[in-house]
Structures are given as C-alpha cells and as structure tokens.
Image (cartoon, rainbow, N blue to C red):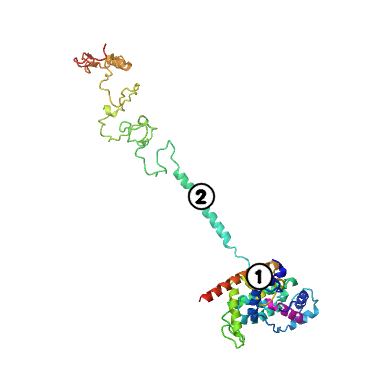
C-alpha cells in the first residue's frame, strides 16, 4: 500500500499555498499514487511516470488559483486528467530521456511488465468510470475509502464502480481465455 | 453486500483470490515515488515571508488591473438600414394605393374607360354640341343623356338604340321602314300549364290581325277556357268548324253505351 496522506493534509495544502515546500512534498507523496493511476488510465506507464512530475509542478505553480483547501483532491485530479489529454494530443512530440513504450527494456521482469501491460489494456477497454477506479484499486493498491478520499468522489460511487468494473473485467478475461484455448 | 467481507472494497481479509491474482499481475506498474524538484520561487518566497499564511494576499504574479476600453460598436449601419426600410415601406404603400385606385370600377354614369382621355381626342360617339355643322336631322343620335356605349348583356328594352351614322348627304333609306322601328314587344300571354306557349317574337299565324273581327278572339278565348270540344276541327282560313268525323266510321267507340 502506498503512503496514505497525512491526516492533516488540509493544513499541508494551506502551508503549501503559503510557499511551504516541505508541506508540498508531503502532498506529493500522499497523492502521487492517485495521480499516477489516473494517468495510467490514458497513457502508457513510462509516460505516466513523467507526467506525474509535471502534474505536481503545475499544481505547485497554480496553487494560488485553488479557492478552497478542501478542493485539493479533485483539483489535483483535474490537473492529472488535463496532463494526460495534452500528452495524447502531442503524442508525436517526445521529450528527451523518455523511452517510447514500444521498445523493450532490459529489466529482468520485462515479461511480467509486458503481461501487466496487456492486462492494463483490457482494463482500459472498460467504460471510463470503471477504468480509473479499477486501476487505482488493482494497480496502485488503494482501498475503496482511500480512492474516495484522494479523488474527492463519494464512497458509494467508488464502490459501485469497483464492483461493476470488476464484473465486466472478469467476463472479458474469461472470453479471452476461451479464445486463447480454442486457438 | 457486507463491506467487512468485501475484499475488493476494503483490501483486507478475507481475500478474494481472483482480485488478489490481478493485484499481483499489475503490481509492476505501480507508482514509485521520486523526488520532486520544485522550481525556485525566490520572488514568491520573499512575498510569502511578509504575508500571513492563511490570508489570500494580492499576488505579485497577477496582472495589473487596467481599464480596458471596449471599442464602440459601429452602429452606423443600423440607422441607415432602418431608414431604408421605412422609405421602401412608404414607396410600397404608395404603389399599393395607386393600384387600388386604378382597379376601382368606373362610376355607373360614366361609361368612358378608366383614365381620362386625352383632351385632343374626341369621342366619336359622344354628342358634340359645339359643332355647328351638325344638325339634328343628319344623325340619329341616342338620347342626350343616354350612354354611347351599349351593354351587350343588358336588357334589350333598356338599351338605347344604337346610333347609326350616315352621311349627311344621304337620306336614311331605312328611316321609315318598320325594321328600323323598335320591335313591338308583346306581353307574354298567360297560359295554363300544359298549354303551348309561343315565342313572343313569332307571330301566331292563327292569331287574328289587329283589324280582325272579334270572332277569332272569342274563339281563342273559348279555347283558352276549354269550351271547344277536343277533336273538333275547324277551317283555319275561314274559322268555321268542320264537320268531320272524329274517328273512322267503321270503328265504334268501345266505351260508348
């Protein structure tokens, strides 16, 4: 499980708005998994790691535009989704130092990573409301209450989407296994 | 569904095998925190030291408020368009009014066509009192007040006689002929239903002349009254009854008693 946000993340937000970098670093560690999971729903894993940094930099620069401290989770989620959309629009432009997703890596668990990416593609085929909650639960390891707290969504909404998304994902996996066994 | 045993919701025991399997497969894509390098905010750091932490102080990066004068909208074409529409509407109304006047039927006493004729042109059919060469006997004029144009669909009795123009040197050869006289209109005889009605223009060949005696007239009246026995013949030239058998002598009336 990732590091949960500090119980007084509201105070960290207020301090960060005042210019406290340490408070903003705590916010970065507490909400980084949520931002990464939202980005994984749209972009490849390598780009998602870079976009997490960009999203927090954008949040640091635009922190003055945040009207209420309580709106920090939803406000940060919006910045993450916008970053994913901007990245998809400029997919032809690659920043230096970023490996394209098509090239294989030299890591020993490359096969595992490929299999994981294939499963991620299956999750992405689900409706968008199910994709984000399932990725935050299955990839980032966040629980349902944590997802609701870090995204600003209601717990009931998150729970319904988790179960409906899981039902559809099981059906797709079962159809995929049947197709693979027939071939 | 009980939340305590919902592994998908809580992430705690009892573990859902399928969900746990998916978690292990996707664990390699999980986010690894990295150090976040924030850009230097020297100007903001200096400003944050002086201002209170929870107060929303005016930002240094905000743009200076300036009064932006909106350019005046060019409304010059609106009044011109309205004036043009008003003029067009007025012209159109005048055209409609003139057209209505032109389409009005002429007055009953005025047989002349619409539109005043040219003063230079004289109506050849109108009486000209100013012409000294004309005399009353040269032309057959209609009534002085009668219209010169004849309505072809009007009642013949109301139609004035058409003017007949003849040369002043020639005498009208038909002036005294009975054809030039207006036809005598006979009053329509009242006839009983079933009786033959003669056209008023046709003279009854069997009707007596004006100078004839009253015998035929009486006979007609008797006939009209039904006094003449059916089948009785009479001589049309003499008016006397003919003694002719009503039927063949060899035939006997079957209904006779």
Residue drawn at x 36%, y 40% is B123
* Residue annotated with mark 1: A162
User: Up-down: is B101 above or below B218?
Assistant: below
**Percent coordinates x, y for residue B246 in the rendering:** 22, 16
* Label disc, if present, on residue A119 of the rendered structure: none
**Percent coordinates x, y for residue A1 in the rendering:** 71, 78
* Residue annotated with mark 2: B93
Q: Do labels 1 and 2 touch, CB within 8 Å?
A: no
Q: Chain of mark 2?
A: B
Residue A75 horizontal side relative to residue B250, left or right: right
Label 2: state its secondary structure: helix
Residue A80: in sight, yes or no? Answer: no
Q: Chain of mark 1?
A: A
Q: Residues within 10 Å of mark 1 (few under 14, many from 20)?
A: many
Q: Give yes or no for residue A24 being in the magenta stretch.
A: yes
User: Up-down: is A131 above or below B230?
Assistant: below
Label 1: state its secondary structure: helix
Residue A166 horizontal side relative to residue B137, left or right: right
The part of the chain drawn in magenta is: A20-34
Using the rendered view, name the quadrant where residue A78 is placed: bottom right
Asked if badges 1 and 2 are on one and the same chain, I answer: no
Q: Residues within 10 Å of mark 2 (few under 14, many from 20)?
A: few
- In the rendered image, the residue lying farthest to the bottom is A106
Foreground disc of the pair 1, 2: 1
Q: How many marks?
A: 2
Which residue is at the front of the view, A22 or B194?
A: A22
**Percent coordinates x, y for residue A141 in the rendering:** 68, 77
Give the spatial CA distance, label 1 vs label 2. 74 Å
């Amino acid at each position: 499980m990732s590091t949960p946000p500090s119980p007084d993340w509201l105070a960290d937000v207020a301090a960060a708005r005042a210019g406290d970098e340490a408070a903003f670093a705590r916010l970065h560690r507490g909400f980084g998994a949520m931002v990464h999971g939202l980005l994984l729903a749209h972009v490849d894993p390598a780009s998602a790691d870079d976009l997490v940094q960009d999203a927090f930099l954008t949040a640091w620069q635009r922190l003055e535009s945040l009207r209420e401290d309580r709106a920090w989770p939803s406000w940060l989620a919006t910045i993450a989704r916008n970053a994913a959309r901007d990245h998809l629009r400029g997919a032809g432009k690659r920043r230096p130092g970023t490996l394209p997703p098509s090239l294989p890596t030299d890591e020993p668990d490359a096969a595992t990573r490929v299999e994981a990416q294939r499963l991620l593609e299956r999750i992405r085929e689900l409706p968008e409301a199910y994709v984000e909650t399932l990725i935050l639960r299955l990839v980032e390891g966040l629980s349902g209450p944590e997802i609701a707290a870090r995204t600003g969504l209601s717990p009931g909404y998150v729970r319904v989407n988790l179960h409906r998304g899981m039902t559809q994902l099981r059906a797709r996996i079962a159809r995929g296994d049947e197709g693979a066994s027939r071939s | 569904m009980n939340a305590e045993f919902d592994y998908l919701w809580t992430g705690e025991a009892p573990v859902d095998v399928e969900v746990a399997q998916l978690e292990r497969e996707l664990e390699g894509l999980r986010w690894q925190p990295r150090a976040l390098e924030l850009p230097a905010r020297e100007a903001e750091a200096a400003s944050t030291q002086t201002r209170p932490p929870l107060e929303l102080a005016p930002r240094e990066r905000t743009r200076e408020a300036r009064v932006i004068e909106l350019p005046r909208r060019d409304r010059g074409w609106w009044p011109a368009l309205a004036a043009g529409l008003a003029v067009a509407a007025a012209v159109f109304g005048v055209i409609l009014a003139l057209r209505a006047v032109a389409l009005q039927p002429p007055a009953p006493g005025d047989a002349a066509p619409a539109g005043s004729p040219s003063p230079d042109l004289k109506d050849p059919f109108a009486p000209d009192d100013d012409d000294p060469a004309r005399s009353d006997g040269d032309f057959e004029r209609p009534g002085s007040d009668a219209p010169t144009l004849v309505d072809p669909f009007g009642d013949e009795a109301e139609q004035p006689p058409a003017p007949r123009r003849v040369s002043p040197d020639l005498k009208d050869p038909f002036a005294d002929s009975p054809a030039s006289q207006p036809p005598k209109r006979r009053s329509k005889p009242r006839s009983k239903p079933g009786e033959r009605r003669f056209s008023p223009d046709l003279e009854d060949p069997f009707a007596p002349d004006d100078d004839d005696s009253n015998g035929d007239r009486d006979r007609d009246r008797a006939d009209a009254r039904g006094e003449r026995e059916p089948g009785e013949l009479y001589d049309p030239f003499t008016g006397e009854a003919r003694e002719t058998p009503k039927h063949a002598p060899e035939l006997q009336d079957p209904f006779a008693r």
